[in-house]
Image (cartoon, rainbow, N blue to C red):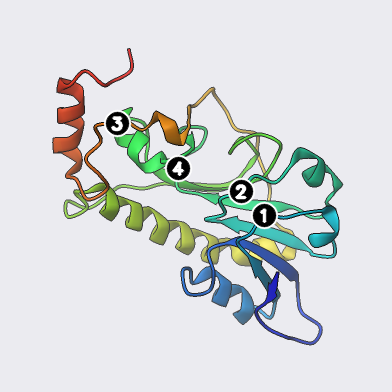
């Protein structure tokens, strides 16, 4: 755990999980809101590690917080996900939105004991420009929009004026191992790649 700033009488004491201050502008936005921010990308071991925070923000965090730890916490955990939930929970949501022809978007939701199944706080559809023709470009566009949505909504999060609504519908979930073996990579043209995978018979029936 690493303290990113020191401030007297902070508005909120926040633990940020995942990306660091060089990878996201969200951390600086929280500091500019006079919040005390600590950061880690490592696995959290023990409830004492995260007790004492007013809220936890998870963005780009690669580890699962256990159900027991979630239940023991006295603060909300907000997760930022580049998908329009309930579609494309889990790994590689940007790929699956194109492959399965499901909505592209971004979601901020509460963490529960499932994978991206918690109640939704705020979400938006994302429509890409014509120049966003590869997976890596759309990935960057989604992350940029997700950060802007969080920063635009952060005052409500900090003042407790947010609401969370249960996810509707079955949606979909994918694991990292579900990615087609013949996938050409994130710099592939999206339309060409989907056609290729379709021709090769790699789509789910």
Along the polypeptide, which appears first: circle 4 or circle 1? 1
Tag 1 and tag 2, C-beta contact below 8 Å: yes
Please rate how many residues cluster around mark 4, counting C-alpha atoms within 10 Å: few if below 14, some from 14 to 19, many from 20.
many
**Label 4 element class:** loop
Residue 131's spot in the image, x, y percent? 17, 55
Q: CA distance from mark 1 to mark 3?
A: 29 Å
Q: Mark 2, residues whose alpha carbon is within 10 Å: few (<14), some, or many (≥20)?
A: few
Q: How many marks?
A: 4
Residue 184 or 20: which is nearer the viewer? 184
Residue placed under numbered mark 2 in the picture? 63
Question: Cα distance, mark 4 to mark 1?
Answer: 24 Å
The Cα–Cα distance between marks 1 and 2, rounded to whole angstroms, is: 6 Å
Give the numbered dot on residue 35: none
Distance from the alpha carbon under mark 4 to that under mark 2: 18 Å
Quadrant for the C terminus, please: top left
Mark closest to the chain's N terminus, 3 or 4:
4
Q: Position of residue 172 (x, y in %)?
A: 48, 27
Query: Of tags 2 and 3, which is closer to the observer?
Result: 3
Residue beneath disc 1 = 43
Structural distance between the alpha carbons of marks 3 and 4 = 22 Å
Q: Say what secondary structure mark 3 lies in.
A: loop
In the rendered structure, find residue 181 and report the number of the disc placed on it. 3
Q: Quadrant of residue 179?
A: top left
- Going from the N terminus, do you reach mark 4 or mark 2 first? 2
* Tag 3 and tag 4, C-beta contact below 8 Å: no
Secondary structure under badge 1? loop
Of badges 4 and 2, nearer the viewer stands 2
Q: Is residue 87 left or right of residue 62?
A: left
């Amino acid at each position: 755990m690493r303290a990113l700033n020191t401030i007297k009488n902070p508005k909120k004491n926040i633990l940020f999980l995942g990306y660091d201050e060089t990878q996201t502008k969200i951390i600086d936005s929280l500091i500019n809101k006079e919040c005390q921010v600590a950061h880690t990308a490592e696995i959290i071991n023990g409830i004492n590690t995260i007790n004492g925070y007013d809220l936890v923000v998870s963005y780009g965090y690669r580890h699962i917080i256990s159900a027991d730890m979630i239940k023991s916490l006295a603060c909300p955990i907000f997760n930022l996900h580049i998908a329009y939930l309930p579609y494309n929970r889990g790994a590689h949501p940007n790929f699956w939105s194109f492959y399965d022809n499901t909505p592209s978007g971004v979601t901020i939701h509460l963490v529960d004991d499932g994978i991206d199944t918690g109640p939704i706080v705020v979400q938006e559809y994302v429509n890409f420009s014509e120049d966003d023709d590869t997976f890596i470009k759309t990935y960057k566009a989604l992350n940029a929009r997700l950060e802007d949505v969080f920063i635009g909504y952060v005052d409500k999060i900090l003042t407790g004026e947010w609401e969370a609504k249960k996810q509707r519908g079955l949606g979909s979930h994918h694991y990292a191992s579900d990615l087609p073996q013949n996938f050409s990579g994130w710099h592939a043209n999206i339309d060409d790649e989907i056609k290729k995978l379709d021709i090769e018979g790699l789509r789910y029936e």
